[in-house]
Image (cartoon, rainbow, N blue to C red):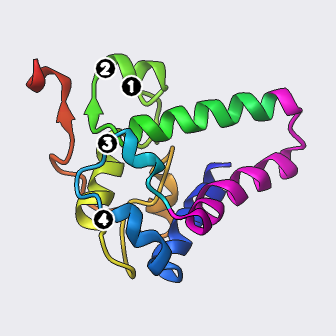
């Protein structure tokens, strides 16, 4: 499913920027900004990739519902900007090839344009590496410890 999410996120940057730029108009992502997305963009970026994954894997309806719930929760986390060991553990971001919150923060910070953007991966940075779209992450995230 993550490969389809990668492709679904890259398509709006390459060919449907007029619909995706609304989502990128928010310079600092927040959990609420996850929902700030054009309906066509949401369909291409989220709906079709998840449905494709369900059809390809012939997922049971309950499994598909669990996948959707976990996927939306992770998308909200990715837009939170918070990078903490507890959330990284809960969302299994401690596993190899997993994209940290910093990867998506860097996408919003450094890829607010239509062509040649970076860091499209939702769950794994492996797709960005394989297709040459892995960008520098740097210090784009906010650490929980810095806000206490």
Helix, strand or loop at mark 4 = loop
User: Along the polypeptide, which appears first: circle 2 or circle 4?
Assistant: 4
Query: Looking at the image, do the residues carrying marks 2 and 1 touch, with CB atoms under 8 Å apart?
Result: yes
Q: Which mark is residue 88?
A: 1
Place of residue 102 in the rendered image (x, y in percent of width and height, measured from the top left): 29, 44
Label 1, label 4: how far apart the Cα atoms are = 27 Å
Residue 39 position (above or below residue 144): below
Q: Is residue 133 left or right of residue 42?
A: left
Q: Is residue 58 left or right of residue 137?
A: right
Q: Is residue 2 left or right of residue 83?
A: right
Camera-side residue of 94 and 39: 39
The quarter holding residue 46 reads bottom right
Query: For the residue carrying disc 1, how many other residues have a C-alpha within 10 Å: few (<14), some (14-19), or many (20+)?
Result: some
Label 4, label 3: how far apart the Cα atoms are = 12 Å
Q: Which mark is residue 25?
A: 4
Magenta stretch bounds = 38-62
Residue denoted by label 2: 85
Q: Give the residue drawn at x 36%, y 66%.
A: 118
Q: Which label sits in the foreground, 2 or 4?
A: 4
Q: Which mark is residue 54?
A: none
Q: Is residue 56 left or right of residue 33?
A: right
Query: For the residue carrying disc 3, how many other residues have a C-alpha within 10 Å: few (<14), some (14-19), or many (20+)?
Result: some
The quarter holding residue 110 reads bottom left
Camera-side residue of 72 and 92: 72
User: Along the polypeptide, which appears first: circle 3 or circle 2?
Assistant: 3
């Amino acid at each position: 499913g993550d490969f389809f999410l990668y492709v679904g996120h890259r398509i709006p940057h390459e060919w449907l920027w007029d619909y995706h730029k609304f989502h990128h108009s928010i310079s600092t992502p927040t959990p609420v900004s996850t929902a700030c997305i054009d309906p066509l963009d949401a369909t291409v970026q989220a709906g079709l990739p998840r449905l494709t994954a369900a059809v390809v894997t012939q997922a049971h309806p309950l499994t598909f519902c669990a996948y959707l719930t976990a996927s939306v929760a992770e998308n909200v986390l990715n837009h939170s900007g918070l990078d903490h060991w507890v959330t990284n553990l809960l969302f299994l971001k401690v596993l190899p090839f997993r994209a940290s919150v910093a990867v998506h923060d860097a996408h919003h910070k450094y890829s607010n344009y239509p062509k040649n953007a970076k860091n499209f991966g939702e769950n794994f940075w492996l797709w960005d590496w394989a297709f040459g779209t892995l960008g520098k992450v740097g210090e784009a995230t906010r650490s929980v410890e810095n806000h206490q």
